[in-house]
Amino acid sequence: MLRARDIMTREVLTVSPETRIGEATRLLLERRINGVPVVDDTGRVVGILCQSDLIAQQKQLPMPSLFTLLDAMIPLRSLKQLEKQVEKIAASTVAQAMTQAPVTVDPDTPVDQLAALMVDRKFHTLPVLSDGRLVGVVGKEDVLKTLAMLPLKDRSGSPEA
């Protein structure tokens, strides 16, 4: 069975939390990648920045729904959640737009588990860590390339017709 180590990209492009949003956006577009791990000064993965995080900046801020109880207006939406949305929309650095504490996998994670994570949790990029150190990244394209190379009988469990 193939594992993350067999399909991951080993030369990982990373950004720091202080990277400007414009620079990170250009990087993703020029390299034609969906996401990039965010690492701090010590090399620890602190987040991931994906195209969807950048697209969120174009989102309009929803006004919280309110209701009145004894002449007081009470928001139905968490103020903390609203603050996070405002920060993401107005982000000027990667730290403000990234998804913090990303889901990571280890080099021995089987490809079927990688695929399940990507489908079930809508992930496009998974950092691969070994002993807490970034050693690679697996993207949806890596999984698709792997599937394209397998004979049909290996993908479905039944022989080719």
Image: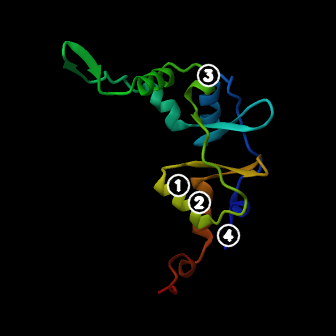
Relative depth, front residue between 69 and 155: 69
Q: Position of residue 36 (x, y in %)?
A: 65, 39
Query: What residue did someone put label 1 on?
Result: 118
Specify the quadrant of the image occupied by residue 93.
top right
Name the residue that disc number 2 marks.
Answer: 114
Q: Secondary structure at mark 3?
A: loop
Residue sitting at x 75%, y 38%: 44
**Crowding at label 4, few (<14), some or many (≥20) Cα neighbours within 10 Å?**
few
Looking at marks 3 and 1 on the same chain, the residue that comes earlier in the sequence is marked by 3
Determine contact: label 3, label 1, CB under 8 Å. Answer: no
Whole-percent x, y for residue 135 in the image: 77, 50
Residue at screen point 72% across, 37% down: 14
Residue at mark 3: 93
The residue wearing badge 4 is 2
Residue type, numbered disc 4: Leu
Q: How many neighbours does mark 3 have within 10 angstroms: few (below 14), some (14-19), or many (20 or more)? A: some
Query: Would you say residue 158 is visible in this rendering?
Result: yes
Identify the mark nearer the N-term, 4 or 1.
Answer: 4
Please state if 38 lies on the left or on the right of 43 as rendered.
Answer: left
Q: Which residue in the rendered view is the most extreme toward the front?
A: 70
* Mark 3 → mark 4, Cα distance in angstroms: 37 Å
User: Mark 2: which amino acid?
Assistant: Leu
Element on which disc 4 rests? loop
Residue 17: where, in percent of width, then height?
67, 27
* Element under disc 2: helix
* Amino acid at dot 1: Met
